[in-house]
Image (cartoon, rainbow, N blue to C red):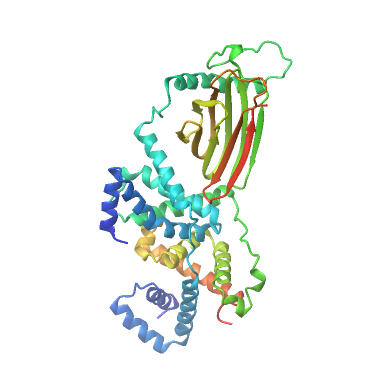
């Protein structure tokens, strides 16, 4: 993700260049949607949050600080909006586990879709702060520093949350028979 | 070396955050400690599993929805006080404020009560003849996962009033289609903290709204309404997830 290119895009967007806007949306739509989906476990909610994130970026273009990376800013909005949505609902949406009965079968695990369902189910069992660091590290490949910037926590806290989240996931994955049988 | 130290080094290796010195330190540690090797294997298994999870494709309509929303928001920013509404519509909006207050009052009042006590009221005074029907001509309940509320169609002489009240967990696109019904757009008024985006054409209106919303759309019959004519207004509601719901409200 090229910071200079992003800065140029932002400048063009501010001038009302629709192509620049479209390029920006095309560049970040999928990663933001995926991050929101991993946070929320629901495709419709993920699409809603993606829209909200881009709209907020657009509405606050004038306040964008080029010192920070654009993607950090968009992710921060998307993750915060996801957490807000979960809090507003006051409970976790039950993950659709229609295929859960076959998850322990090795042949079923070969199917990426089932693996995806199983991992998502485990993610949804994590606390939001732990889920966020896993999503940002493993699904968007952010560095400790970038995660810290997005979540506005020190790098040390990022490492400690990652460790806790991984320990929990490791145990749950073993319990589901995904690895380490 | 304590557990915490080797865990930190293993994590740093996994996350590509290991410095040269730490690399050497970790290699020594792994050579000496079976426990460290087992922990490293566990963490690597987890990372490998997460790498196998494919990324999801966003809905095909998502990008266009985002761009449409931004475009509407941009127009509002550019011209916050002039939404390309004709003078007559602006007058209708002023009129709307009174009507919105009055609808509320009529609903609160029992049907057979005498004159309304206006001593404590604050707001626009509206001629009784200008009030809409007390009961809606048609009504639609919105009971979706992401959108809860109602749409009511009221009538006042030649004016049709569509009253939207809903709460949505994300952006909602609404299309109000009155093509071929002998109607024209007359105005729009809202009481929402976040104003909805509005795009008006000759025979339809596109609205993008999010969160708690309360707004009114005014349509007027262009000619003398035939006694037998029942104008139908088609509503299409689309959530950001791409789910589409359609309904028709009729001026019965």
In the figure, residue B109 lies in which quadrant? top right
Residue B199 % position (x, y): 45, 35
Which quarter shows the N terminus of chain A? bottom left
Q: Is residue A67 visible?
A: no
Percent of width and height locating residue A45: 53, 52
**Marker count (numbered):** 0
Taking the spot 39% from the left edge, 89% from the top edge, the residue there is B31
Which residue is at a point 40% across and 81% down the rendered structure image?
B1
Q: Nearer the viewer, residue A162 or B210?
A: B210
Give above or below for A61 relative to A33.
above
Instruction: Compare residues B63 and B38 and report the one nearer the observer.
Output: B63
Q: Is residue A162 above or below residue A14?
A: below
Question: Percent from the top left, x then y, of residue B163?
Answer: 58, 29
Decide if residue B193 is in sight here: yes
Q: Is residue B66 left or right of residue B96?
A: left
Q: Residue at x 33, y 80 (%)?
A: B23
Outermost residue toward the bottom?
B31
Residue located farthest toward the right when viewing the structure as drawn? B112
Which quadrant, please, contains the C terminus of chain A? bottom right
Q: How far from the left and from the top, in percent, is residue A70?
A: 33, 54
Q: Nearer the viewer, residue B121 or B194?
A: B194
Q: Quadrant of residue A116?
A: bottom right
């Amino acid at each position: 993700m090229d910071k200079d290119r992003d800065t140029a895009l932002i400048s063009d967007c501010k001038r009302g260049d629709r192509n620049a806007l479209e390029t920006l949306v095309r560049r970040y739509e999928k990663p933001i949607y995926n991050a929101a989906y991993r946070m929320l476990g629901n495709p419709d909610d993920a699409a809603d949050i993606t829209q909200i994130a881009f709209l907020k970026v657009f509405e606050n273009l004038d306040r964008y600080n080029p010192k920070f990376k654009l993607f950090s800013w968009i992710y921060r909005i998307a993750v915060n909006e996801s957490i807000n949505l979960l809090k507003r609902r006051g409970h976790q949406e039950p993950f659709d586990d229609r295929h859960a009965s076959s998850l322990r079968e090795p042949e079923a695990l070969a199917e990426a879709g089932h693996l995806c369902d199983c991992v998502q189910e485990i993610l949804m069992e994590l606390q939001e702060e732990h889920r966020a660091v896993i999503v940002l590290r493993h699904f968007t490949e952010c560095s400790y520093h970038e995660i810290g910037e997005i979540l506005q926590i020190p790098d040390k806290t990022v490492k400690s949350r990652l460790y806790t989240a991984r320990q929990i996931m490791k145990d749950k994955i073993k319990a589901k028979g995904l690895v380490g049988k | 070396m304590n557990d915490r130290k080797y865990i930190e080094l293993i994590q740093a290796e996994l996350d590509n955050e290991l410095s040269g010195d730490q690399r050497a330190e970790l290699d020594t540690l792994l050579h000496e400690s079976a426990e460290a090797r087992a922990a490293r294997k566990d963490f690597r298994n987890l990372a490998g599993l997460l790498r196998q999870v494919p990324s999801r494709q966003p809905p095909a309509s998502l990008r266009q929805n985002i761009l449409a929303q931004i475009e509407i928001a941009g127009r509002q920013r550019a011209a916050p006080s002039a939404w390309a509404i004709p003078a007559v519509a602006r007058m209708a909006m002023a009129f709307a404020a009174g009507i919105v207050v009055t609808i509320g009052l009529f609903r609160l009042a029992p049907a057979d009560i005498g004159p309304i006590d206006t001593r404590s009221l604050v707001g626009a005074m509206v001629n009784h003849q200008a009030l809409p029907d007390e009961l809606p001509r048609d009504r639609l309940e919105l009971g979706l996962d992401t959108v809860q509320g109602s749409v009511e169609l009221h009538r006042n002489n030649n004016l049709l009033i569509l009253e939207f009240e809903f709460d949505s967990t994300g952006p909602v696109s609404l299309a109000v289609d009155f093509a071929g019904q002998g109607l024209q757009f007359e105005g729009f008024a809202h009481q929402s903290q976040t104003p909805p985006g509005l795009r008006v054409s000759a025979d339809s209106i596109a609205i993008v709204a999010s969160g708690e919303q309360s707004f009114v759309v005014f349509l007027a019959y262009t000619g003398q309404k035939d006694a037998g004519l029942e104008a139908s207004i088609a509503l299409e509601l689309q959530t950001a997830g791409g789910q589409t719901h359609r309904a028709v409200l009729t001026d019965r």
